[in-house]
């Protein structure tokens, strides 16, 4: 029911003259017309309007942004004209191809990696990626990628738009390098030797502008305040004709700029008479149709003018006004930075005040700036927080900085207000809104009067990543060096006994042929062969065992044993070896019996290796002490010699695999450098630790502990252990590289 002053909105169907049903969106109301109550119907055709694929493709072909669609095999289903122009090809020549058909593998891998991340995330994403034009020139794009999935959730194709940001990147990199040069300035000599060539930088930026907007000529004119005029600083392409014989253009003031381009204040204008006037100095530029002029200013300071020109019959396709103003602003910052740096170099007496001005200027232009209360809550931030970390002002204000700091860094960044009387510096990681962490280098200062903390920070993420990669590279180089040293060492270890064995065999054979071999000589040759065979066996055993440690197959077979008795038997079994060198071997213990869970074979390996080292490096008439003590929890074993000792700078690497305290060419005795690494592994497998103490020419002491614990009977392993004959063969093997035996 209709009521006066109330509208009804409804879809109504009407028949056309051709009996076609037409649906209209209708607004029906009751009102008075010429004193009569009437029904008013206002309708609008809501028939759908269809657009063809050709209409959409024509629109995309006229667009400056490059666009493409790829299937799941990365083959192009569609590209627009701008995208095809990158490769100097027609659209039809690219359809059906993939990036691998025309790009290098490194670039392809970068794009495919990015695509995979976006496909897996199932979300649209924007990222910066580099590319390469058909002529080989490197460019940068801001890519917006959108994955599309079918009704079953399977990936179908990827739609992407590319915006050329090469110019913006060149300008940003130039500004960043310019800024770094100033912030890293420590002395005038360094500044002079590393000064950035602003002329080449502006020329490169100008070339990128010409490529970006399709202009035929470009000039950058810098304003000389003292001479009241403009100097043609950078002139490119067709603009060279206009400034061929011009070194200086006088103008009365900045206001003279307003009448330069046919009376137009600023921007792109059509040139009807090919005439450009600089105050009273007309310049005739034939065959031009459009000229653009843009002020280069920073705050209220007039720095210069950037001009662009288009040839006859060439019409700019896109409106570049805001883009050019943004570029001019960045150029102004570069020029201003360079001029400030020159003032620092040329005016040494004003250095301190100038550096303060640079710090203030650059902190507002590049760095993060924050103001905190005494509790660390944000009170104010600059806009770079959003640009760098993604957080808006509303998301940060009145929140503590600790909420955004990496958990591992919070404990290292607790400071007191009284610490901030002078600038306080520290580095930490802050959370980006996208979930990643950014490294920031902070400078903090407390204002006692206002009770606030002022802080500035620089993004050093790239620097930290480079240092991390550098560290990894150094570690790899270090590891490779160790491996090379090991292979050289191990080759020598194998070669020496093999050569001795072969030489002995040849000598034996020759003596047999000459009937000069007697039993005494034969036993001597056999002993030599046996000793060097033991050396090879010892080396192979060590290599096999250390490999088992690496892959987790070097296992203990523990049982409850009197460890004091085991160590005493092993020590006494090597008496013959030490007597040969007139070395006194002393065994001492405070306890006669300690039953604990251990592997006798492995304990024997440890003691023999340590005694072997002690005998090698202890001179004749030296002393070796083996001492056993215990506390409530551990058995403590000490093996101390009066030998040559180990340099203090080698103590940290003595247990590293394939390392030796003595140089390969100067060491007194043979060895592969893996024995002590195996000793450390065995002790730690028992739950103990080992340390080394040494003084050069005074001796070395190895101390290790084995925890006292007992196994249940069902956990014990049965060992065939004979204290009398248990060590004989293994002693021969372990001491085979002591030449005096």
Image: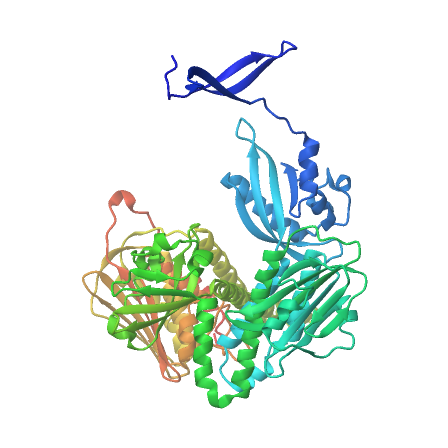
The total number of labels drawn is 0
Q: Residue furthest left?
A: 632
**Percent from the top left, x then y, of residue 168?**
60, 60
Query: At x 42% / y 59%, what residue is drawn?
Result: 385
**Percent from the top left, x then y, of residue 495?**
60, 68
- In depth, the one of 270 and 484 nearer the eye is 270
- In depth, the one of 557 and 633 nearer the eye is 633
Query: At x 74% / y 53%, what residue is drawn?
Result: 315
- In depth, the one of 165 and 407 nearer the eye is 165
The colour scheme of the drawn protein is rainbow
Residue 497 in sight here? no
Horizontal side, residue 350 vs residue 378: left or right: right
- In depth, the one of 216 and 7 nearer the eye is 7
Residue 11 in sight here? yes
Horizontal side, residue 496 vs residue 359: left or right: right
**Percent from the top left, x then y, of residue 660?**
47, 72
Q: Residue furthest front?
A: 34
């Amino acid at each position: 029911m209709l009521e006066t002053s109330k509208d009804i909105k409804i879809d109504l169907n009407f028949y056309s003259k051709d009996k076609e049903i037409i649906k209209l969106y209708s607004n029906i109301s009751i009102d008075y017309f010429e004193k009569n109550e009437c029904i008013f119907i206002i309708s609008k055709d809501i028939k759908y309007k269809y657009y063809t694929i050709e209409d959409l493709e024509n629109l995309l072909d006229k667009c400056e942004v490059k666009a493409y669609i790829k299937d799941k095999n990365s083959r192009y289903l569609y590209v627009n004209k701008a995208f095809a122009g990158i490769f100097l090809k027609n659209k039809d020549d690219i359809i059906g191809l993939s990036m691998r058909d025309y790009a290098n593998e490194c670039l392809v891998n970068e794009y495919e990696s990015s695509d995979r991340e976006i496909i897996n995330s199932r979300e649209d994403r924007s990222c910066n990626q580099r590319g390469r034009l058909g002529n080989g020139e490197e460019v940068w794009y801001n890519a917006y990628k959108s994955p599309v999935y079918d009704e079953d959730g399977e990936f179908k194709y990827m739609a992407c738009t590319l915006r050329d940001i090469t110019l913006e990147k060149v300008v940003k990199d130039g500004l960043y390098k310019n800024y770094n040069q100033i912030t890293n300035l420590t002395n005038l000599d360094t500044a002079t030797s590393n000064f950035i060539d602003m002329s080449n930088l502006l020329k490169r930026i100008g070339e990128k502008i010409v490529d970006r907007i399709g202009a035929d000529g470009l000039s950058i004119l810098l304003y000389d305040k003292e001479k009241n005029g403009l100097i043609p600083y950078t002139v490119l392409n067709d603009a060279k004709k206009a400034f061929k014989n011009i070194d200086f253009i006088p103008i009365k003031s900045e206001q003279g700029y307003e009448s330069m381009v046919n009376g137009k204040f600023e921007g792109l204008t059509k040139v009807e008479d090919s005439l450009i006037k600089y105050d009273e100095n007309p310049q005739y530029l034939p065959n031009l149709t459009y000229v653009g002029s843009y002020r280069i200013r920073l705050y209220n300071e007039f720095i210069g003018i950037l001009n662009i020109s288009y040839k006859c019959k060439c019409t700019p396709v896109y409106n570049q006004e805001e883009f050019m103003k943004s570029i001019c602003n960045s150029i102004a910052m570069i020029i201003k930075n360079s001029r400030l740096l020159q003032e620092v170099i040329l005016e040494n007496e004003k250095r301190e005040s100038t550096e303060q001005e640079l710090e203030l200027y650059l902190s507002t232009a590049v760095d993060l700036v924050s103001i905190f209360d005494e509790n660390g809550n944000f009170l104010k931030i600059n806009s770079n927080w959003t640009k760098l970390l993604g957080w808006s002002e509303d998301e940060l204000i009145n929140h503590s900085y600790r909420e955004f700091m990496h958990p591992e860094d919070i404990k290292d960044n607790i400071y007191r207000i009284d610490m901030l009387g002078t600038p306080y510096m520290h580095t930490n990681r802050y959370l980006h809104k996208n979930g990643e962490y950014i490294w920031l280098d902070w400078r903090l200062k407390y204002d006692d009067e206002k009770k606030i903390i002022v802080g500035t920070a620089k993004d050093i993420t790239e620097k930290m990543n480079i240092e991390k990669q550098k560290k990894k590279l150094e570690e790899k180089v270090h590891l490779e060096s160790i491996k090379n040293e090991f292979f050289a060492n191990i080759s020598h270890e194998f070669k020496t006994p093999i050569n001795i064995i072969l030489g002995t065999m040849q000598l034996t054979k020759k003596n047999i042929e000459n009937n000069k071999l007697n039993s005494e000589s034969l036993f001597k040759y056999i002993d030599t062969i046996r000793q060097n065979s033991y050396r090879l066996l010892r080396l192979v055993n060590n290599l096999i065992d250390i490999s088992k440690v690496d892959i987790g197959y070097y296992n203990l077979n523990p049982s409850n044993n009197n460890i004091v008795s085991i160590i005493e038997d092993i020590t006494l079994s090597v008496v013959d070896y030490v007597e040969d060198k007139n070395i006194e071997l002393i065994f001492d213990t405070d306890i006669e019996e300690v039953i604990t869970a251990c592997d006798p074979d492995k304990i024997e390996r440890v003691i023999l290796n340590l005694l072997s080292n002690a005998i090698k490096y202890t001179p004749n008439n030296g002393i070796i002490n083996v001492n056993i003590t215990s506390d409530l929890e551990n058995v403590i074993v000490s093996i101390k010699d009066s030998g040559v000792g180990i340099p203090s700078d080698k103590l940290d690497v003595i247990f590293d695999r394939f390392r030796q305290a003595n140089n390969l060419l100067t060491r007194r005795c043979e060895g592969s450098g893996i024995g002590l690494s195996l000793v450390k592994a065995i002790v730690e497998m028992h739950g103990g630790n080992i340390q080394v103490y040494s003084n050069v020419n005074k001796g070395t002491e190895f101390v290790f502990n084995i925890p006292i614990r007992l196994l249940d009977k069902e956990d014990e392993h049965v060992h065939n252990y004979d204290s009398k004959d248990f060590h004989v063969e293994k002693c021969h093997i372990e001491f085979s590289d002591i030449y005096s035996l």
